[in-house]
Image (cartoon, grey):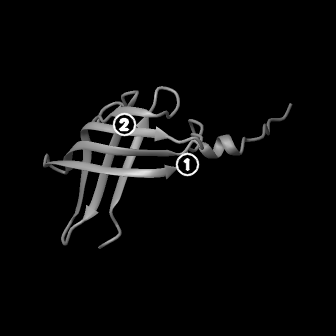
Amino acid sequence: MLGDTGVGVVVYPTDSVRSGTYKVFNPTGAALRPGAAIAARWFTETAIRGAQGDSGTVTLETDRNGRLSGTVSAATLGVPGLTKGRMRGSFSDLEVQKALPYGCVADSLHPVKDSSVS
């Protein structure tokens, strides 16, 4: 199945996303700040395969309009199993979006009115 490959890169900044190099950590533990996590999935003839980052770097650059470009270079572990591999790639012209609030998004977007009777 061509066209159904997915790659995810998550950057965990200390406060906001900035230009710089973020160390890749294995995402099965707690998020390390500043740091980054990566994962990929693809289809073979008989199975869905995946990999997650184990070490390496994600490097970000911000242009004058606040858009991000960068590179990924990481060692990976296969999921399931422990097959080792390498992931390298680049991305460009990404728009930074404000993070959604913590908790239930629906509650924060549509607050419940007080229906108590006094």
Whole-percent x and y of residue 17? Answer: 50, 34
Q: Residue at x 42, y 39 (%)?
A: 60
Task: Kindly state the secondary structure of the residue where label 2 is placed.
Answer: strand
> Relative to 20, is 113 on the left or the right?
right
Whole-percent x and y of residue 68? Answer: 49, 44
Q: Which mark is residue 36?
A: 2
> Relative to 81, is 69 on the left or the right?
right
- Tag nearer the camera, 1 or 2: 1
Q: Residue at x 45, y 39 (%)?
A: 61
Pointers 1 and 2 in contact (C-beta within 8 Å): no
Q: Is residue 16 above or below residue 73?
A: above
Q: Residue at x 32, y 44 (%)?
A: 72
Q: Is residue 73 visible?
A: yes
Which of the marked residues, 1 or 2, is nearer the chain's N terminus?
2
Q: Quadrant of the C terminus?
A: top right
Give the distance between the C-alpha atoms of the residues marked 1 and 2, in whole angstroms. 18 Å
- Residue type at tag 1: Glu
The residue under label 1 is: 95
Q: Quadrant of the N terminus?
A: bottom left
- Residue type at tag 2: Ala
Q: Is residue 27 visible?
A: no
Q: Which mark is residue 118?
A: none
Q: Residues within 10 Å of mark 2 (few under 14, many from 20)?
A: many
Quadrant of the rendered structure where residue 38 is?
A: top left
